[in-house]
Amino acid sequence: DAGVIQSPRHEVTEMGQEVTLRCKPISGHDYLFWYRQTMMRGLELLIYFNNNVPIDDSGMPEDRFSAKMPNASFSTLKIQPSEPRDSAVYFCASSKPGEAGANVLTFGAGSRLTVL
Amino acid sequence: SQKIEQNSEALNIQEGKTATLTCNYTNYSPAYLQWYRQDPGRGPVFLLLIRENEKEKRKERLKVTFDTTLKQSLFHITASQPADSATYLCAFSNYGGSQGNLIFGKGTKLSVKP
């Protein structure tokens, strides 16, 4: 398996533009997570899905952020309109509960977003 | 509110020594915790998992302890090597089942000098 695949790896955009980040989880994994990482706040969970259904979106910062998972092999995180404070590395991760039902995450390489 | 703290942002040690990283939590009763390694420009990679009823877990040169009384986990790398230089993240979940998100600490950047 190629692992969790994210695109784009880097995105530079101007304030007010729409940004769409994409993720392909590992086949057979039924959990998908979106995290955001900054120096100040570390790795923050934004939203996670189980079997394509959003379970917890309490980490989504505001209405400008939305996430979808139309099928088991694809998810998007959209920011509209984008702001400079959204600049961060966005990670997608997937998992399949194993030992004791624990979720061990496999992360993608991340999408580095810069909003000017 | 729930809080996870890793004892320091950076740790510098000499090659061959044991590195010990600390992770503390408050207002939390995790069922298990995990340690991940993150290299620059990459996503975190899973290393070890330990459950609340386990005191210690080992994997090669790595050892993790979990003290629910102290609300603390220690992560040890014995006979450290420059290749161990990376940022190490601890993560907790408050569910024993398959639900639940992982809450991460900010990480400790380990530098092993030759």
Image: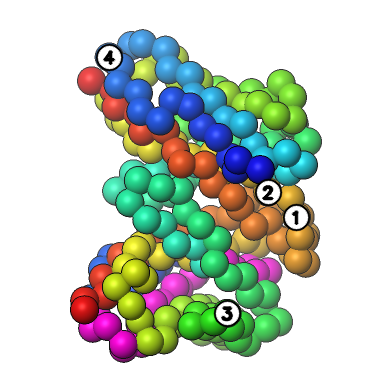
Q: What amino acid does circle 3 point to?
A: Lys
| Depth check, front residue: A111 or B105 | A111
Which quadrant would residue A24 be assigned to in this image?
Answer: top right
> What secondary structure is marked by label 4?
loop
Q: CA distance from mark 1 to mark 3?
A: 20 Å
Residue A48 placement, left or right of A96: left
Q: What amino acid does circle 1 point to?
A: Pro
> What secondary structure is marked by label 1?
loop
Residue B45 placement, left or right of A56: left
Confirm whether the magenta stretch covers residue B19: yes
- Read off the residue under disc 3: B59
- Read off the residue under disc 2: A95
- Read off the residue under disc 1: A97
Measured as percent of width and height from the top left, residue B75 is found at 46, 78
Q: Nearer the viewer, mark 2 or mark 3?
A: 3
Q: CA distance from mark 2 to mark 1?
A: 6 Å
Measured as percent of width and height from the top left, residue A44 is found at 46, 46
- Read off the residue under disc 4: A14
Residue A75 visible at all? yes
Residue A64 visible at all? no
> What secondary structure is marked by label 3?
strand
C-beta proximity under 8 Å, tags 2 and 1: yes
> What secondary structure is marked by label 2?
strand
